[in-house]
Image (tube, coloured by chain):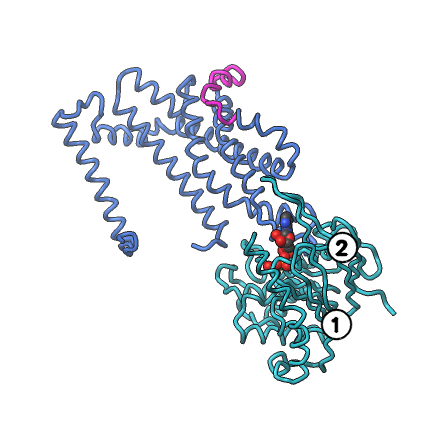
């Protein structure tokens, strides 16, 4: 048995109070989570519960207040070099064209520009942006920019994919296209994926396992649901199957109270 | 709202602009010819342009113009380069910038033209005292903008570049510098004008060459037309340099909307 791709052990993250005063805020407390090699895990939970925080910890961008991270059996210190991270917010370099953004990682690795360009062109057409490589970011729609971001990360073939609500801003049709596309890419070359989403249906239709987080503060996983639906899947069709609906009902049962709690916390804040 | 009106086409705009210029000159001409404005103080447009024509056709202005432009260019590029390097460096070094920031602010609020006599003592009455004065003005303009540009780098873009594998140097080249460029160009338009101010004021306060010297000389014999001729010549060249900056800005900031 190979070592799991990601092991989060008793992770807590406490943010210091802002300079204007107030209390330190503990976003997540004692979170333990294991992602097997090649496993696709979704994390769902109410807004503000600390999903992005956990991803930042896994990426090595944020040092947890307590706890440790193992990546393929090695303890993580500094940036996680085996992970590709698709951020929740826009993260592309606006001063580069689409293709220059996709090439950026190869350029940083000192790969020959001609070869990088060829590979980036391939990836652009793979995410449905053939011929749009020379466009600057402001000339692309929000959904197109998301696809550039996806290509920018996948071109580096990371062993671990960290995706923070990657398709949140897309319309339903484009979204399902992208979900199927991601699943196809993933099953061709199984990477470990941590996929964060607000959308429970998206989580179930894509994943091997769904982790439900409680509302913050001091959020932690309150349920883990293995999804043993057959693959390959079509994300649109699978939502209509009775097995899907059964799993959905079971997870929603756990989630509902937490979503309400999270919402009320935000009202008060 | 009238702000939403579409602009007239460029050729028509240029005709209007020319008309505006002719009208202003005509007004100046009529007012001074009819002695409503005394020509001794306000000059006469025809004589001013005749003076400029004479300078350029006889070639007598070229040595002066060359030296002023050289001083301006040296001050502009020197100050910009120093400001760029210092701004990048301090922007990336929080401790050093916290240490130096009150001093930099104090230096910046000091009226730097006062330094002209000191620079004259240090560097003599030649080229370098003017360049030093220009640099002391341009440097701070560029420096503060670069410094802010570096600090305002989008943290998500930065984190993304780091995750993609950028080394420290690559971060500088691929993220910090391009991100600061918007701010740099905002300051360069001011810097062009200020480099001219440094050169001309320096010449004005003590020199034997340059447009500032020419103006000073004309003032000495109360030749208001030559003074205005010098001022107009300077304005034209400053405007030309500003257009070069605009051109470079268009090319380098092509990625920005509009
Ligand atoms: N740098 C920080 N300083 C202070 N508090 C922070 C910081 N980063 C996150 N937080 C707080 O930690 C909590 C979790 O934030 P996080 O971004 O992880 O939420 P999330 O689950 O990703 O939410 P969403 O689904 O809306 O993206 C929030 O209450 C947030 O205000
Ligand atoms: Mg988030």
In this picture, is A108 found above or below B214? below
Crowd band around label 2 with a 10 angstrom C-alpha radius: few (<14), some (14–19), many (20+): many
Verify whether residue A216 appears in magenta.
no
- For the point 54% across and 42% down, the residue is B149
Image x and y of residue A126, in percent: 62, 72
- For the point 72% across and 82% down, the residue is A230
In this picture, is A207 found above or below A98? below
Label 1 and label 2: CA atoms lie apart by: 26 Å
Image x and y of residue B228, in percent: 28, 27
**Magenta span:** B107-125
The colour assigned to chain B within the rendered structure: blue
Residue B160 visible at all: no
> Relative to A172, is A234 on the left or the right?
right
The colour assigned to chain A within the rendered structure: cyan
Image x and y of residue B122, in percent: 54, 16
Viewer-side residue, A82 vs B118: A82
Secondary structure beneath dot 1 equals loop
Crowd band around label 1 with a 10 angstrom C-alpha radius: few (<14), some (14–19), many (20+): some
- For the point 16% across and 27% down, the residue is B32
Image x and y of residue B175, in percent: 60, 49
Q: Which residue is mark 1?
A: A190
Quadrant (top left/top right/bottom left/bottom right) for the C terminus of chain B: bottom left
In this picture, is A163 found above or below B173? below
Chain under label 1? A
Viewer-side residue, A25 vs B86: A25
Q: Which residue is mark 2?
A: A11
The mark that comes first in sequence, 1 or 2, is 2
Verify whether residue B109 appears in magenta.
yes
Secondary structure beneath dot 2 equals strand
């Amino acid at each position: 048995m190979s070592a799991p791709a990601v092991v989060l052990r008793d992770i807590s993250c406490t943010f210091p109070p802002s300079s204007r005063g107030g209390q330190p805020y503990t976003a997540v407390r004692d979170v333990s989570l294991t992602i097997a090699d090649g496993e696709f895990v979704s994390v769902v939970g109410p807004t503000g519960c600390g999903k992005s925080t956990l991803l930042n910890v896994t990426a090595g961008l944020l040092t947890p207040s307590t706890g440790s991270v193992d990546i393929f059996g090695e303890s993580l210190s500094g940036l996680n070099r085996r992970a590709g991270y698709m951020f929740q917010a826009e993260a592309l370099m606006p001063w580069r064209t689409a293709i220059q953004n996709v090439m950026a990682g190869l350029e940083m690795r000192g790969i020959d520009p001609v070869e990088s360009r060829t590979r980036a062109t391939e990836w652009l057409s793979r995410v449905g942006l053939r011929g749009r490589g020379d466009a600057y970011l402001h000339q692309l729609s929000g959904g197109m920019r998301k696809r550039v971001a996806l290509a920018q990360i996948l071109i580096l073939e990371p062993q671990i994919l960290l995706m923070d609500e990657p398709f949140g801003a897309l319309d339903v049709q484009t979204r399902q296209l992208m979900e199927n596309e991601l699943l196809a890419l993933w099953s061709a070359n199984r990477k470990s994926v941590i996929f964060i989403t607000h959308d429970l249906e998206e989580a179930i239709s894509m994943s091997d396992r769904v982790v439900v987080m409680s509302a913050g503060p001091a959020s932690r996983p309150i349920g883990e649901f293995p999804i043993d639906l057959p693959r390959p899947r079509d994300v649109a069709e699978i939502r209509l199957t009775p097995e899907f609906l059964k799993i959905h009902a079971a997870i929603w049962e756990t989630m509902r109270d937490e979503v309400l709690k999270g919402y009320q916390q935000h009202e008060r804040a | 709202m009238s702000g939403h009106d579409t602009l007239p086409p460029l050729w028509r705009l240029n005709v209007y602009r020319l008309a505006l210029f002719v009208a202003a000159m005509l007004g100046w001409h009529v007012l001074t010819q009819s002695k409503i404005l005394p020509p001794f103080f306000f000059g006469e447009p025809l004589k001013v342009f005749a003076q400029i024509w004479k300078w350029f056709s006889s070639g007598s202005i070229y040595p002066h113009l060359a030296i002023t432009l050289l001083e301006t260019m040296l001050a502009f590029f020197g100050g910009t380069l120093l400001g760029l390097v210092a701004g990048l460096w301090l922007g990336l070094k929080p401790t050093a910038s916290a240490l130096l920031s009150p001093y930099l602010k104090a230096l910046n609020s000091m009226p730097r033209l006062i330094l002209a006599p000191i620079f004259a003592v240090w560097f003599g009455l030649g080229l370098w005292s003017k360049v030093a004065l220009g640099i002391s003005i341009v440097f701070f303009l560029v420096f503060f903008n670069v410094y802010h540009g570096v600090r305002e780098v989008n943290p998500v873009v930065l984190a993304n570049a780091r995750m993609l594998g950028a080394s420290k140097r690559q971060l500088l080249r691929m993220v910090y510098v391009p991100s600061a460029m918007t701010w740099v160009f905002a300051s360069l338009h001011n810097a062009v004008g200020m480099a001219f101010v440094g050169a001309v004021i320096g010449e004005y306060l003590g020199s034997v060459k340059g447009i500032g010297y020419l103006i000073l000389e004309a003032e000495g014999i109360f030749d208001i037309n030559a003074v205005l001729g010098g001022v107009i010549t300077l304005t034209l060249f400053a405007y030309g340099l500003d257009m070069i900056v605009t051109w470079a800005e268009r090319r380098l900031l092509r990625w920005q909307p509009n």
